[in-house]
Image (tube, grey):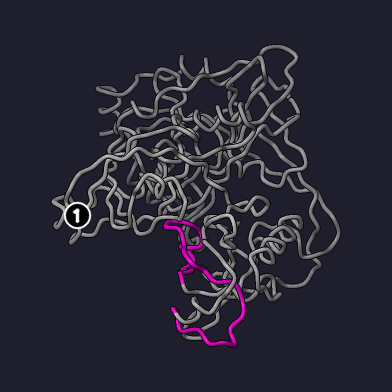
C-alpha cells in the first residue's frame, strides 16, 4: 500500500502485457454487456456537465528540487521488505549519496478550495522535498506556490497558497460520512502527466485501514487512480469533494480498481487547523490501547471486537486524571460509539484540545461514565518532546515510544546484563511506526546513526541532525533481553 506507487514486485514485461491483454479480453465483455446495463439503469448517463464545471478548479502540481546525483557506483542490493530497504531508498534515491547536483521534477494533482485567497489542497508526498512548487491550471496559466500553509504527514494532507491575479475557480467539500458504498464518484487529476483526466466509479468500501498511519480511515473506490492522481479530488455526483485521492494497490504501478482517498470530513478538520494554527493540534487521551479479545468480550458481555481495551494509562495524563484505569474497555467517546480499537485514536485526535467530553466504559462488567478534559498530543517532533511523567521525570515520548535512561529497576525487570548501555523502551504505542517495526517494551536502543546513545537527549540530537540532512528516518541498533541485536530504520 503506497501513494501512487506499486506495492509488490512488478511482473516481467511479457507477463505484464499478457495480463493487460487478458484483462482487456475479459473485461471488455463485462463493460459492453453488464457494465452498460448497470450504467444505463442506475448510473449517471453522462458526467460531462459536472466535469466541465469542475475541471477548471483542479490543478496539476509540478515540483522541482536540487539533489546530488549518483557518484556512478553500483547501488547496494537490499532484500525486498527488509528494514534496510526504506533506509537505502531514502539515502541513495534521494540523492544523498554524493555526486554532482542535478534538478529533478515530479507531478501530482491538487484542487482550489478558496479562489480569492488562492488556497490549494494536495498531498504531502506530492510536494515533499520540493524547492519550487507550481500550480498549473486548465486554461494554461501557472502560479508559483508562495507558501505551504500547513502539512500533515500522518494524513498526507497539505495546504498551499498562491497569489491569484483574479479569483480562481474553486470547489467545496461535501460530507464523506453521508456517502455510501455503491454511490457513484468521479476523480479528476493528472495521471502520468495527462492533465485534466476524468474517471468514474463507485465507492467500494469505507473506513479502510491500509496500515499507512495511525489514523487510517480511507474511502476505497474503483474509479481509476494512477500515478499523478495523488492530491486530486474525488467528487460525488453533486460536484462536492468527498475525498482526496492518495494511494493505490497495484502490482504493476497502474490502476487495478483499488484506490484510496482521505475522507473529506477528515480533510476539512485538518484544513481548518492549518488556517487557524498553521499546524495540526490533535487531541490526546493518554492511554495505550489493545484489541478486545474474544475472552474479554465474552466475560464482559460485549459483541466481538467492540470497544477499545485500555492496556495502560500514562501517568498524569487526561485519562489518569479522569479516573480511567488499566483493563477498562472504552465503548463510547464524546457520544460516538467505539466499535473497534483502531477507531478511538482517530476520534480522540479529531477532538478539540481542552474540550471536556463524556467517556463511557466498562469496568469489571459495570458500565460507567467519566468526564475527561482532552489534552494535546505531542507529535513525533524531537524539538518539544513531551514528558509523560511528573515535573522531574526523565521519561519522554518520541517516535511512538516512551523512553527513559536505562536504570537498575529496568535491568532487573527485563533481565538485562549490567554491560548493556543505552535508552530503555518503556512502552510502544499500538499502530505506531515503532510497533510496525516490532520494537517492544523491554528493548534497549544502544546506537543511533552508528553512535552510542545513553540519554533521550542524545537520540533527539541524532534525529535533529538526520532531519537537517534531508533524510526522513534514523537507523537504530536495538538490543533485547536475550542479547540479540538488530538494526531498525525508523521514520520520524
Image location (x, y in percent) of residue 63: 71, 40
Which quadrant holds residue 92?
Answer: bottom right
Magenta segment range?
Answer: 413-441
Q: Give the x, y percent position of residue 169.
A: 61, 15
Q: Residue tagged by mark 1?
A: 364
Q: Could you say where residue 253 lies in the image, as x and y percent from the top left?
A: 51, 51
Is 432 within the magenta?
Answer: yes
- On the question of residue 319 being in view, the answer is yes
Considering only vertical position in the picture, is 462 above or below 420?
Answer: above
**Residue 260 left/right relative to 40:** right
Farthest right residue? Answer: 100
- The one of 390 and 110 positioned closer to us in this rendering: 390
Q: Is residue 340 left or right of residue 480?
A: left
Q: Quadrant of residue 403?
A: bottom right
Q: Which residue: 16% across, 51% down?
A: 365
Q: Residue at x 27, y 38 (%)?
A: 337
Q: Using the image, determine if residue 384 lies above or below residue 295.
A: above
- Quarter location, residue 128: top right
Q: Is residue 60 left or right of residue 203?
A: right
Amino acid at each position: 500500500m503506497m501513494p501512487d506507487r506499486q506495492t509488490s514486485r512488478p511482473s516481467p514485461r511479457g507477463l505484464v502485457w499478457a495480463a493487460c491483454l487478458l484483462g482487456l479480453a475479459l473485461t471488455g465483455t463485462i463493460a459492453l454487456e453488464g457494465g452498460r446495463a448497470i450504467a444505463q439503469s442506475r448510473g449517471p448517463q453522462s458526467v460531462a456537465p459536472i466535469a466541465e464545471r469542475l475541471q477548471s478548479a483542479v490543478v496539476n502540481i509540478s515540483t522541482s528540487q536540487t539533489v546530488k546525483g549518483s557518484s556512478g557506483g553500483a547501488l547496494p542490493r537490499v532484500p525486498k521488505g527488509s528494514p534496510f530497504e526504506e533506509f537505502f531508498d531514502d539515502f541513495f534515491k534521494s540523492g544523498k549519496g554524493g555526486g554532482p547536483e542535478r534538478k529533478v521534477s515530479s507531478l501530482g494533482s491538487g484542487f482550489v478550495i478558496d479562489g480569492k485567497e488562492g488556497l490549494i489542497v494536495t498531498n504531502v508526498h506530492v510536494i515533499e522535498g520540493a524547492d519550487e512548487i507550481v500550480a498549473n491550471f486548465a486554461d494554461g496559466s501557472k502560479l508559483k506556490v508562495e507558501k505551504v500553509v500547513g502539512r500533515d504527514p500522518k494524513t498526507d494532507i497539505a495546504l498551499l497558497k498562491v497569489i491569484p491575479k483574479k479569483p480562481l475557480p474553486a470547489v467545496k467539500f461535501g460530507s464523506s460520512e453521508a456517502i455510501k458504498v455503491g454511490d457513484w464518484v468521479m476523480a479528476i487529476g493528472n495521471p502520468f502527466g495527462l492533465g485534466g483526466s476524468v474517471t468514474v466509479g463507485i465507492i467500494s468500501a469505507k473506513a479502510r485501514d491500509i496500515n499507512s498511519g495511525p489514523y487510517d480511515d480511507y474511502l476505497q473506490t474503483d474509479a481509476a487512480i494512477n500515478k499523478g492522481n495523488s492530491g486530486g479530488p474525488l467528487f460525488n455526483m453533486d460536484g462536492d469533494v468527498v475525498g482526496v485521492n492518495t494511494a493505490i494497490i497495484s502490482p504493476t504501478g497502474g490502476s487495478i480498481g483499488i484506490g484510496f482517498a482521505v475522507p473529506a470530513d477528515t480533510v476539512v478538520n485538518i484544513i481548518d487547523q492549518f488556517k487557524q494554527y498553521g499546524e495540526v493540534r490533535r487531541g490526546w487521551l493518554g492511554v495505550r490501547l489493545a484489541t478486545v479479545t474474544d475472552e474479554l468480550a465474552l466475560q464482559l458481555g460485549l459483541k466481538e471486537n467492540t470497544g477499545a481495551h485500555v492496556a495502560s494509562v500514562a501517568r498524569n495524563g487526561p485519562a489518569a486524571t479522569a479516573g480511567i484505569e488499566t483493563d477498562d474497555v472504552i465503548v463510547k467517546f464524546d457520544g460516538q460509539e467505539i466499535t473497534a480499537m483502531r477507531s478511538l485514536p482517530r476520534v480522540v485526535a479529531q477532538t478539540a484540545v481542552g474540550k471536556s467530553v463524556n467517556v463511557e466504559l466498562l469496568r469489571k462488567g459495570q458500565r460507567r461514565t467519566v468526564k475527561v478534559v482532552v489534552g494535546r498530543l505531542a507529535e513525533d517532533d524531537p524539538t518539544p518532546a513531551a514528558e509523560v511523567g511528573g515535573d522531574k521525570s526523565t521519561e519522554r515520548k518520541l517516535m511512538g515510544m516512551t523512553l527513559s535512561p536505562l536504570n537498575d529497576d529496568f535491568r532487573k525487570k527485563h533481565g538485562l546484563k549490567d554491560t548493556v548501555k543505552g535508552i530503555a523502551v518503556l512502552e510502544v504505542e499500538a499502530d505506531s511506526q515503532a510497533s510496525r517495526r516490532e520494537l517492544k517494551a523491554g528493548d534497549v536502543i544502544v546506537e543511533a546513526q552508528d553512535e552510542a546513545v545513553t540519554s533521550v537527549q542524545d537520540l533527539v540530537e541524532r534525529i535533529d541532525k538526520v532531519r537537517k540532512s534531508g533524510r526522513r528516518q534514523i537507523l537504530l541498533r536495538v538490543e533485547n533481553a536475550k542479547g540479540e541485536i538488530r538494526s531498525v530504520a525508523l521514520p520520524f
